[in-house]
Image (cartoon, rainbow, N blue to C red):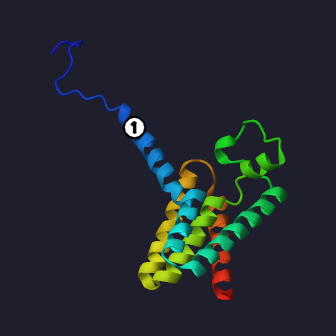
């Protein structure tokens, strides 16, 4: 075979790593949605529709507490997001709260949801479902470089503690 002649079935493999990375980031974005505010509010609306008003109120209170505590922490301790290193610093008060990465509010909402899933379902299945839920959201936030492991661990723990505290009170 001549040196310039191509081999049969010679497949170029270089695009595959970038394609796999792109698909994994897209999957992480989709999973991250499970910890978003619209998803959480949709869950509360579903509970209201099912007549579980007490559960919806507990989750709404947990949401407000989560935002409040995270905002206070972010006011006292600003931490740059991993994907924002070297970029312009936020200038406004609310912009600074939003730009801070510690603790992860997505993970906090996921922790609240995980606690709720366990309280409703119970047993090993409820525990596994709650753990899988919170870990998937936490992992997606780290993969997207919006948080590091400490941010998501603190957020998930905050959410679980808020939910269990309210669960014990009500």
Quarter that holds the N terminus: top left
- Establish if 77 lies above or below 55: above
**Residue 79 coordinates in the image, percent (x, y):** 75, 52
Q: Residue visible at 68% across and 48% down?
A: 81
**Residue 141 coordinates in the image, percent (x, y):** 57, 54
Q: Residue visible at 53% across and 63% down?
A: 42
**Residue 153 coordinates in the image, percent (x, y):** 63, 65
- Establish if 99 lies above or below 45: above
**Residue 2 coordinates in the image, percent (x, y):** 18, 12
Q: Is residue 138 visible?
A: no
Query: Splitting the image into 4 quarters, where does residue 90 fall?
Result: top right
Residue that mark 1 sits on: 19
Query: Splitting the image into 4 quarters, where does residue 170 fall?
Result: bottom right
- Establish if 29 lies above or below 149: above
Total marks shown come to 1
Nearer-the-camera pick, 100 or 13: 100
Q: Kindly state the secondary structure of the residue where label 1 is placed.
A: helix
Nearer-the-camera pick, 169 or 145: 169
Q: Residue visible at 41% across and 43% down?
A: 23
Query: Splitting the image into 4 quarters, where does residue 57 fall?
Result: bottom right
Q: Residues within 10 Å of mark 1 (few under 14, many from 20)?
A: few
Left or right: where 84 falls relative to 76: left
- Establish if 163 lies above or below 39: below
Q: Is residue 118 visible?
A: yes
Left or right: where 91 falls relative to 118: right
Nearer-the-camera pick, 2 or 143: 143
Q: Residue visible at 48% across and 76% down?
A: 50
């Amino acid at each position: 075979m001549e040196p310039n002649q191509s081999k049969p079935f010679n497949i170029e493999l270089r695009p595959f790593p970038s394609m796999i990375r792109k698909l994994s980031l897209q999957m992480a974005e989709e999973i991250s949605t499970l910890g978003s505010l619209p998803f959480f509010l949709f869950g509360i609306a579903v509970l209201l529709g099912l007549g579980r008003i007490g559960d919806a109120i507990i989750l709404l209170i947990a949401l407000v507490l989560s935002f409040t505590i995270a905002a206070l922490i972010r006011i006292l301790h600003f931490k740059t997001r991993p994907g924002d290193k070297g970029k312009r610093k936020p200038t406004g008060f609310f912009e600074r709260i939003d730009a801070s990465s510690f603790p992860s509010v997505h993970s906090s909402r996921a922790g609240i949801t995980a606690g709720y899933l366990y309280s409703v379902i119970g047993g090993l299945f409820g525990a596994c479902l709650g753990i899988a839920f919170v870990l998937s959201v936490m992992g997606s936030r780290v993969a997207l470089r919006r948080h590091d492991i400490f941010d998501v661990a603190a957020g998930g723990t905050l959410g679980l503690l808020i939910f269990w505290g309210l669960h014990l009170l009500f």
